[in-house]
Amino acid sequence: DTTVKQNPRYKLARVGKPVNLICSQTMNHDTMYWYQKKPNQAPKLLLFYYDKILNREADTFEKFQSSRPNNSFCSLYIGSAGLEYSAMYLCASSRGQGASAETLYFGSGTRLTVL
Amino acid sequence: SQWGEENLQALSIQEGEDVTMNCSYKTYTTVVQWYRQKSGKGPAQLILIRSNEREKRSGRLRATLDTSSQSSSLSITGTLATDTAVYFCATDASSGSWQLIFGSGTQLTVMP
């Protein structure tokens, strides 16, 4: 079963309010990722967990937080949503570290709309 | 940016035609991956081609990698309407984390 599940599928948030997105995988993968995708743009890597170690990209360091309470679950947290956070958020997992040589398995995404 | 072209490309063809999509990247890479994203779904990997491989095939798909010109291509032969999707190339970037960085993709529409 190569399934990555994301909840919810659609989320509405108000400007200035927090947002929490959830992802789960049952493949016992070591690494979980969060990408942000806006229309007509490339998916942009926000952060990833290798086991319990969180790595955040430099240009999104202060905007996103994440937690991974166990191997299967990973969340993406926005402390204060702004209009620019409206996007599709894609969660992915891979067996090992170093995604360049690994297959990434993606969920169907959560579409976040900030009003 | 890692990528030569930044805007989403769009191609529209008839079912049965062959199509080739191209990517060019700017810095050294060890691998190029091609993903397909259908409407309402997340991206799914099609092919992974390493820097020591020039070509890789999978069914109707053929990927090439030319490290000297820093470019990769994905060809689909005998397209089907179900091939309609956005196709992304992705590679590792010298950002320090060696994670997958995606290009902006090609929107392929195959008309029945």
Image (spheres, coloured by chain):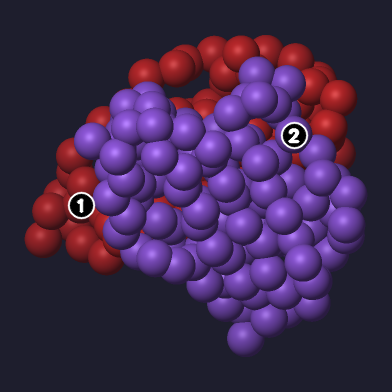
Q: What secondary structure is found at the residue carrying circle 2?
A: strand
User: How many labels, in total?
Assistant: 2
Closest to the observer, B66 or A10: A10
Q: Residue furthest front?
A: A17
In this rendering, does residue A112 appear at all?
yes
Residue visible at 32% across and 45% down in the picture: A13
Secondary structure under the numbered disc 1 in the rendered image? strand
Q: Quadrant of the C terminus of chain A?
A: top left
Circle 2 crowding by C-alpha within 10 Å: few under 14, some 14–19, many from 20 = many
Give the side of residue A106 with respect to residue B93, left or right: left
Q: What shade does chain B have?
A: red
Q: Residue at x 30, y 58 (%)?
A: A10
Q: Amino acid at mark 1?
A: Val
Q: Which chain is purple?
A: A
Look at mark 2 in the image and give the residue it sits on.
Answer: A56
Residue A73 rendering spot, x and y as whole percentages: 68, 69
Pick whichever, B17 or A34, lies toward us.
Answer: A34
Horizontal side of residue A9 vs A72, given as left or right: left
Q: Is residue A48 left or right of residue B44?
A: right
Is B19 situated left or right of B58 in this image? left
| Tags 2 and 1 touching, CB below 8 Å | no
Of all residues shown, which one is farthest toward the left? B112
Q: Position of residue B103 (x, y in %)?
A: 52, 29
State the quadrant of the N terminus of chain A.
Answer: bottom right
Tag 2: residue type?
Arg
Residue behind mark 1: B110
